[in-house]
Amino acid sequence: MPFILENLNVYQKAVAFADRISGLTESFPKGKDYLADQLNRASLSIPANIAEGNGRFLPKDRRNFFVIARGSAQECLSLLEVAKRRNLITEEEHAELVEDLEIIVKMISGLIRRENEKK
């Protein structure tokens, strides 16, 4: 029986984003491990915190994890900018990933708004 979480569109998009980042950073050259590691950690934090928040019972707890997930998405934005400036990703890859992040952030903001309404 699948977890209800797996039906959340935002969770699916966040997992797909983290998977894409993981594949992308595999091609980063030696010496850029710090950037690959931080980008992977931040991208994995998005679906992980959505999952953990979804597993909480209290709206305040759920909201807190969703806020962390949104913060991790914002962190990815700055890391992608550095990767682009270092020519580790193309302009096109950067634009696509930023577009994905914008969608994910809007969806997470919707989760946060919903939890705020439960107060």
Image: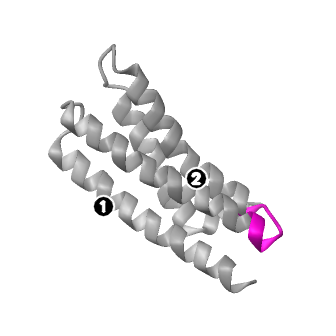
Where's residue 20, x and y in %?
40, 43
Quarter where residue 61 is shown: bottom right
Q: x and y percent of residue 113 in the render?
A: 59, 79
Determine if the magenta segment contains residue 43.
Answer: no
Structural distance between the alpha carbons of marks 2 and 1: 17 Å
Can residue 4 be seen by looking at this rendering?
A: no
Residue at the image position 43 percent from the left and 54 percent from the top: 74
Quadrant of image for the N terminus: bottom right
The residue wearing badge 1 is 99
Q: Is residue 70 left or right of residue 92?
A: right
Q: Secondary structure at mark 2?
A: helix
- Residue kind at label 1, given as amino acid type: Glu
- The answer to whether 15 appears left or right of 33 in the picture is right
Q: Is residue 42 above or below residue 74?
A: above
Q: Position of residue 99 (x, y in %)?
A: 30, 61
Magenta part of the protein: which range?
54-61
Image vertical order of residue 90 relative to residue 97, above or below: above
Task: Residue at 53% x, 68% y: name it.
Answer: 108
